Image (cartoon, rainbow, N blue to C red):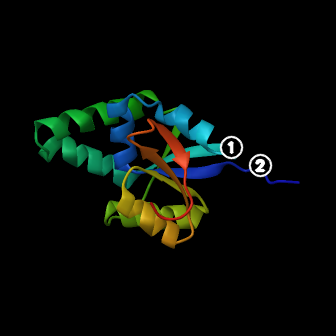
Amino acid sequence: MRDKRRLPVILDTSIIIHALERGVDLIEGLYEASTDPVEIIVPRAVLKELERLEREGDATRKRKARIALAFLTARKSMVRVTETPEGPTDVVILDLAERLKGAVATSDTKLWREATKRGLRVFFLWDSRRRIEEYPGTP
C-alpha cells in the first residue's frame, strides 16, 4: 500500500514571480503536476528575498515582488511558511527539501540542476508550456 503522506514542495522565488507573470495558477498547477498529494511550503528565506526585492529592486522588480507577496498573503491558508536559517536562498531551499524529503518548485535552471544532483524531485515552470511539470534529470 502506498504511503499517502503529503509531499512537501518547496517554492523558489523564481517560480512564484514567473507563474504570476505568465498567468499560471501556481497552487493548482502544483496539485495537477504531482502524482502525490502535496503540501506547498514557502521558506522564510524566500519571503525575505521578496521583501528585499520590494525595498531595493528597480521599479519592475519592486512591482513583481509586491505582487508576489500579495499573492502569498491571499493564499496563506494554502501554503505553509516555515522558518529557515540565514544563508543563500537556493541553499536554504535545497537543504529544506532534503531535510523534509520533499521537492523543489522553480523556474531557475541552475537550481533545477543542483536539486537533481541531490536526487530531489523538481517541479519546473517552462515559459513555452505555461504549465508546471515534474522533470527528472537535467534541463
Count neighbours of disc 1 (C-alpha within 10 A) and say few if under 14, some if 14 to 19, many if 20 or more.
some
Mark 2–mark 1 Cα distance, whole angstroms, equals 7 Å
Q: Is residue 56 above or below residue 102?
A: above
Element at label 2: loop
Dividing the image into 4 quarters, which one contains the C terminus?
bottom left
Q: Say if 70 sits above or below 46 in the image.
A: above
Q: Nearer the viewer, residue 73 or 12?
A: 12
**Left-right relation of 13 to 103:** left
Residue 82 % position (x, y): 47, 51
In this view, the residue in front, 116 or 1, is 116
Residue type at mark 2 is Lys
**Residue 59 visible to the viewer:** yes
What residue do we see at 44% from left, 55% from top? Answer: 83
Quarter occupied by residue 120: bottom right
Asked where in the image residue 112 lies, by quadrant, the reply is bottom left
Q: Residue at x 26, y 38 (%)?
A: 65
Q: Is residue 78 visible?
A: no
Is there CB contact under 8 Å for labels 2 and 1?
yes
Residue at 20% from the left image edge and 45% from the top image edge: 53
Residue 16 position within the rendered picture, expressed as x and y whole percent measured from the top left: 38, 41
Q: Secondary structure at mark 1?
A: loop
**At label 1, which amino acid type do we have?**
Pro
- Label ID, residue 134: none
Residue at mark 2 = 4
